[in-house]
Image (tube, rainbow, N blue to C red):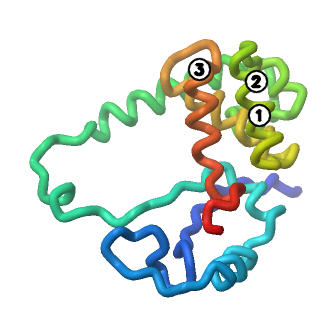
Protein backbone atom coordinates (compact mmCIF):
# COMPACT_ATOMS: atom_id res chain seq x y z
CA UNK A 1 0.00 0.00 0.00
CA UNK A 2 1.36 3.42 -0.91
CA UNK A 3 0.52 6.68 0.80
CA UNK A 4 0.62 10.11 -0.80
CA UNK A 5 3.60 12.16 0.24
CA UNK A 6 2.72 15.45 1.88
CA UNK A 7 5.26 17.84 3.33
CA UNK A 8 5.95 21.50 3.88
CA UNK A 9 9.19 22.88 2.50
CA UNK A 10 10.74 25.80 4.35
CA UNK A 11 13.99 27.12 2.96
CA UNK A 12 16.22 30.14 3.42
CA UNK A 13 18.96 31.76 1.40
CA UNK A 14 21.04 34.90 1.48
CA UNK A 15 20.09 37.61 -1.02
CA UNK A 16 23.57 37.47 -2.57
CA UNK A 17 26.93 35.70 -2.05
CA UNK A 18 28.12 38.17 0.63
CA UNK A 19 24.70 38.21 2.30
CA UNK A 20 24.35 41.99 2.59
CA UNK A 21 22.37 42.98 -0.50
CA UNK A 22 19.80 45.57 0.56
CA UNK A 23 21.19 45.91 4.09
CA UNK A 24 21.22 49.64 4.93
CA UNK A 25 24.04 49.29 7.46
CA UNK A 26 26.47 46.95 5.76
CA UNK A 27 28.40 47.36 2.56
CA UNK A 28 27.25 45.19 -0.30
CA UNK A 29 30.29 43.71 -2.08
CA UNK A 30 28.76 41.67 -4.91
CA UNK A 31 28.60 42.66 -8.55
CA UNK A 32 25.28 42.38 -10.40
CA UNK A 33 26.73 39.43 -12.31
CA UNK A 34 27.63 37.62 -9.09
CA UNK A 35 24.12 38.19 -7.75
CA UNK A 36 22.58 36.88 -10.97
CA UNK A 37 24.76 33.74 -10.96
CA UNK A 38 23.95 33.17 -7.29
CA UNK A 39 20.23 33.59 -7.92
CA UNK A 40 20.29 31.24 -10.91
CA UNK A 41 21.40 28.36 -8.69
CA UNK A 42 17.72 27.95 -7.92
CA UNK A 43 15.82 27.00 -11.06
CA UNK A 44 12.63 28.71 -12.16
CA UNK A 45 10.63 25.46 -12.07
CA UNK A 46 11.67 24.93 -8.44
CA UNK A 47 10.73 28.51 -7.51
CA UNK A 48 7.38 28.01 -9.23
CA UNK A 49 6.60 25.23 -6.75
CA UNK A 50 7.28 27.36 -3.68
CA UNK A 51 4.17 29.26 -2.59
CA UNK A 52 5.73 32.08 -0.58
CA UNK A 53 8.96 33.95 -1.23
CA UNK A 54 9.55 36.55 1.47
CA UNK A 55 12.43 38.77 2.37
CA UNK A 56 13.50 38.76 6.02
CA UNK A 57 15.58 41.89 6.65
CA UNK A 58 17.74 42.23 9.75
CA UNK A 59 15.91 43.39 12.85
CA UNK A 60 16.93 46.60 14.58
CA UNK A 61 17.81 46.61 18.29
CA UNK A 62 14.93 48.99 18.99
CA UNK A 63 12.44 46.46 17.61
CA UNK A 64 14.00 43.63 19.64
CA UNK A 65 13.98 45.59 22.90
CA UNK A 66 10.63 47.34 22.42
CA UNK A 67 8.03 46.61 25.13
CA UNK A 68 5.06 47.02 22.82
CA UNK A 69 3.21 43.71 22.93
CA UNK A 70 2.91 41.82 19.66
CA UNK A 71 -0.17 39.95 18.59
CA UNK A 72 -0.43 36.91 20.84
CA UNK A 73 0.08 33.39 19.56
CA UNK A 74 -3.38 32.50 20.89
CA UNK A 75 -5.03 35.13 18.70
CA UNK A 76 -3.02 34.06 15.66
CA UNK A 77 -3.88 30.41 16.35
CA UNK A 78 -7.59 31.26 16.59
CA UNK A 79 -7.47 32.98 13.20
CA UNK A 80 -5.73 29.95 11.67
CA UNK A 81 -8.19 27.48 13.21
CA UNK A 82 -11.08 29.56 11.85
CA UNK A 83 -9.50 29.65 8.38
CA UNK A 84 -9.00 25.88 8.42
CA UNK A 85 -12.64 25.40 9.42
CA UNK A 86 -13.70 27.56 6.45
CA UNK A 87 -11.57 25.30 4.23
CA UNK A 88 -12.97 22.13 5.82
CA UNK A 89 -16.49 23.33 5.01
CA UNK A 90 -15.48 24.37 1.49
CA UNK A 91 -14.03 20.95 0.71
CA UNK A 92 -16.38 18.81 2.81
CA UNK A 93 -17.60 16.92 -0.28
CA UNK A 94 -14.11 16.34 -1.64
CA UNK A 95 -12.29 13.19 -0.68
CA UNK A 96 -8.85 14.34 -1.81
CA UNK A 97 -8.80 18.06 -1.03
CA UNK A 98 -8.70 19.33 2.54
CA UNK A 99 -7.11 22.75 2.14
CA UNK A 100 -6.58 25.51 -0.39
CA UNK A 101 -3.05 24.35 -1.23
CA UNK A 102 -4.40 21.12 -2.71
CA UNK A 103 -7.08 22.64 -4.96
CA UNK A 104 -7.17 21.48 -8.56
CA UNK A 105 -7.33 23.99 -11.37
CA UNK A 106 -11.08 23.35 -11.71
CA UNK A 107 -11.55 24.03 -7.99
CA UNK A 108 -9.53 27.24 -8.38
CA UNK A 109 -12.04 28.42 -10.97
CA UNK A 110 -14.88 27.65 -8.57
CA UNK A 111 -13.45 28.97 -5.29
CA UNK A 112 -11.07 31.73 -6.39
CA UNK A 113 -13.23 34.01 -8.49
CA UNK A 114 -11.96 37.57 -8.77
CA UNK A 115 -13.88 40.76 -9.38
CA UNK A 116 -13.02 42.96 -12.36
CA UNK A 117 -10.35 44.88 -10.45
CA UNK A 118 -8.76 41.67 -9.18
CA UNK A 119 -8.78 40.17 -12.68
CA UNK A 120 -7.08 43.28 -14.04
CA UNK A 121 -4.45 43.22 -11.26
CA UNK A 122 -3.64 39.57 -11.88
CA UNK A 123 -3.59 40.01 -15.64
CA UNK A 124 -1.11 42.91 -15.30
CA UNK A 125 1.06 40.94 -12.88
CA UNK A 126 1.10 37.92 -15.17
CA UNK A 127 2.08 40.08 -18.13
CA UNK A 128 4.47 42.54 -16.47
CA UNK A 129 6.24 40.04 -14.21
CA UNK A 130 6.12 37.13 -16.65
CA UNK A 131 4.60 34.69 -14.14
CA UNK A 132 4.08 31.09 -15.22
CA UNK A 133 0.76 29.22 -15.22
CA UNK A 134 1.94 27.38 -12.11
CA UNK A 135 2.67 30.71 -10.36
CA UNK A 136 -0.84 31.87 -11.36
CA UNK A 137 -2.37 28.90 -9.53
CA UNK A 138 -0.13 29.43 -6.50
CA UNK A 139 -1.01 33.12 -6.30
CA UNK A 140 -4.73 32.34 -6.34
CA UNK A 141 -4.37 29.65 -3.67
CA UNK A 142 -2.43 32.01 -1.41
CA UNK A 143 -4.94 34.83 -2.03
CA UNK A 144 -7.79 32.44 -1.14
CA UNK A 145 -5.98 31.55 2.10
CA UNK A 146 -5.38 35.22 2.94
CA UNK A 147 -9.08 35.91 2.45
CA UNK A 148 -9.93 32.92 4.66
CA UNK A 149 -7.63 34.26 7.39
CA UNK A 150 -9.54 37.56 7.13
CA UNK A 151 -12.84 35.61 7.28
CA UNK A 152 -13.77 37.13 3.92
CA UNK A 153 -15.97 35.09 1.58
CA UNK A 154 -14.42 36.78 -1.46
CA UNK A 155 -10.87 37.41 -2.58
CA UNK A 156 -10.50 41.18 -2.53
CA UNK A 157 -7.92 43.09 -4.58
CA UNK A 158 -6.04 43.67 -1.29
CA UNK A 159 -5.82 39.91 -0.67
CA UNK A 160 -4.57 39.42 -4.21
CA UNK A 161 -1.97 42.19 -3.84
CA UNK A 162 -0.69 40.59 -0.64
CA UNK A 163 -0.42 37.21 -2.38
CA UNK A 164 1.47 38.84 -5.26
CA UNK A 165 3.86 40.46 -2.78
CA UNK A 166 4.93 36.98 -1.66
CA UNK A 167 6.43 36.16 -5.08
CA UNK A 168 9.68 38.16 -4.69
CA UNK A 169 11.98 35.60 -6.27
CA UNK A 170 9.87 35.38 -9.42
CA UNK A 171 10.76 38.97 -10.15
CA UNK A 172 14.16 40.26 -11.16
CA UNK A 173 14.45 42.40 -8.03
CA UNK A 174 18.18 41.75 -7.58
CA UNK A 175 19.33 43.17 -10.87
Q: Which quadrant holds residue 111?
A: top right
Quarter of the picture containing the C terminus is: bottom right
Mark 3 secondary-structure assignment: helix
Residue holding disc 2? 120
- Residue 54's spot in the image, x, y percent? 54, 55
Disc number at residue 86? 3
Given residues 82 and 15, the one toward you in this image is: 15
Badge 3 crowding class, 10 Å Cα cut-off, few under 14, some 14 to 19, many 20 or more, is some
Above or below: residue 168 compared with residue 94: below
Judged left or right of residue 40, residue 72 is left
> Mark 3 or 1 closer to N-term?
3
- Residue 87's spot in the image, x, y percent? 64, 25
Above or below: residue 100 compared with residue 47: above
Q: Residue furthest left?
A: 67
Given residues 134 and 157, the one toward you in this image is: 157
Q: Are marks 3 and 1 in contact (CB under 8 Å)?
A: no
Residue holding disc 1? 124
Q: Residue at x 44, y 77 (%)?
A: 20
Q: Residue at x 16, y 41 (%)?
A: 69
Instruction: Using the numbered discs, state the Cα–Cα distance from disc 3 to disc 1 in whole angstroms.
Output: 29 Å
Q: Say how many tags the image has.
A: 3
Given residues 175 and 67, the one toward you in this image is: 175
> Mark 3 or 2 closer to N-term?
3
Q: Residue at x 62, y 22 (%)?
A: 157
- Residue 135's spot in the image, x, y percent? 78, 46
Q: Are marks 2 and 1 in contact (CB under 8 Å)?
A: yes
Amino acid sequence: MTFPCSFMLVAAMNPCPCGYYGDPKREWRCSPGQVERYRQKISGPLLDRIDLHVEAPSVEYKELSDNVPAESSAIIRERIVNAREIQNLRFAKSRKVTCNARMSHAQLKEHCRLDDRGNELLKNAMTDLNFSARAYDRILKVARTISDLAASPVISPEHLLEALSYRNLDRNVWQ
